[in-house]
Image: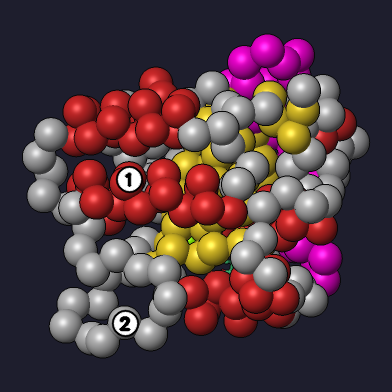
Amino acid sequence: MRIKTGINGLDELIEGGFPEKSTILVSGTPGTGKTLFCLQYIYKGLELGESGIYITLEEKPEELRREAKRFSWNLKKYEDRKKLVILDASARVGLPPTEKYFVEDLDIEDLLNKIYDICLEIKAKRLVLDSLPPLFDKEENIRSKIHKIGRILNEISCTSIIVSETRDENRFSRFGIEEFIARGLIMLNLEEIESRLRMRECRRSIFIRKMRETKHKVRRYPFYIGENGINIDVKGELL
Ligand SMILES: Nc1ncnc2c1ncn2[C@@H]1O[C@H](COP(=O)(O)OP(=O)(O)O)[C@@H](O)[C@H]1O
Ligand SMILES: [Mg+2]
């Protein structure tokens, strides 16, 4: 079974979508479109009747709702119907909570328990964890924490995306371990190129580095962000 990604062009590159119940790691440097990718994945699922949980560690839920609205994706509508939960783990120390679903600090056990409960409550089919690095501020036991996350994700029957922000584009992940709990690895890139007029331009691309149970090409495809979100140019050439 395949889970439609909702990213225009991506499904045809990976045999129709993500393998059901798998965990996919999406990595890239800041501003490469990771959060947008996740929002699009969650929203398109909602449109297909698949409920979802979005765990946000970097942006406040209100920011995500606003961002989604720019693409005409109305998250609130699905939150009201209990089809979507945005779990606020953006850890605003000392501030009173403004969200129905939140965690006060980033204790990994608490967070995972909460995720587990919410997934049961709304029968979530899709999960997004955006992103991992804030969970490992203390640089302690990172390996065992990541494996714990992997075990929980295996247990709940969601198809999950975990996000890892890298500092340079040659690395797959921040900690070098995340890829081991993921059955798929997608890298987003933003690179500077020299155009014909010798002007500096930036170009976005997507690279499917690993996708178990899937025949896929190992190459970069250009993508652009339009009014309807991310669009991959599946015939695009990248030199
Ligand atoms: N409507 C839009 N049209 C074109 N580009 C956009 C639009 N909205 C956002 N972007 C681009 O997407 C980037 C944000 O991507 P985001 O998903 O937040 O990145 P990341 O999570 O990887 O840091 C912005 O920096 C901007 O360049
Ligand atoms: Mg982001």
Q: Mark 1 is on which residue type?
A: Leu
Above or below residue 229? Residue 140 is above
Q: Is residue 227 magenta?
A: yes
Q: Residue furthest front?
A: 121
Give residue 160's quadrant in the image: top right
Q: Earlier in the sequence, mark 1 or mark 2?
A: 2
Where residue 72 sits, quadrant-wise, is bottom right
Return the residue nearer the eye: 29 or 61. Answer: 61
Horizontal side, residue 19 vs residue 72: left or right: left
Question: Residue 109's spot in the image, x, y percent?
Answer: 22, 44
Q: How many marks?
A: 2
Q: Which residues are magenta?
A: 208-232
- Is 168 on the left-hand or right-hand side of 121? left
The residue shown at (64%, 42%) is 125
Name the amino acid, label 2: Pro
Residue 208 vs 43, above or below: the answer is: above
Identity of the residue drawn at 13% across and 34% down: 141
For disc 1, the marked residue is 112
Q: Residue at x 42, y 79 (%)?
A: 99
The residue tagged with tag 1: helix, strand or loop? helix
Q: Which residue is mark 2?
A: 97
Distance CA(mark 1)–CA(mark 2)? 19 Å
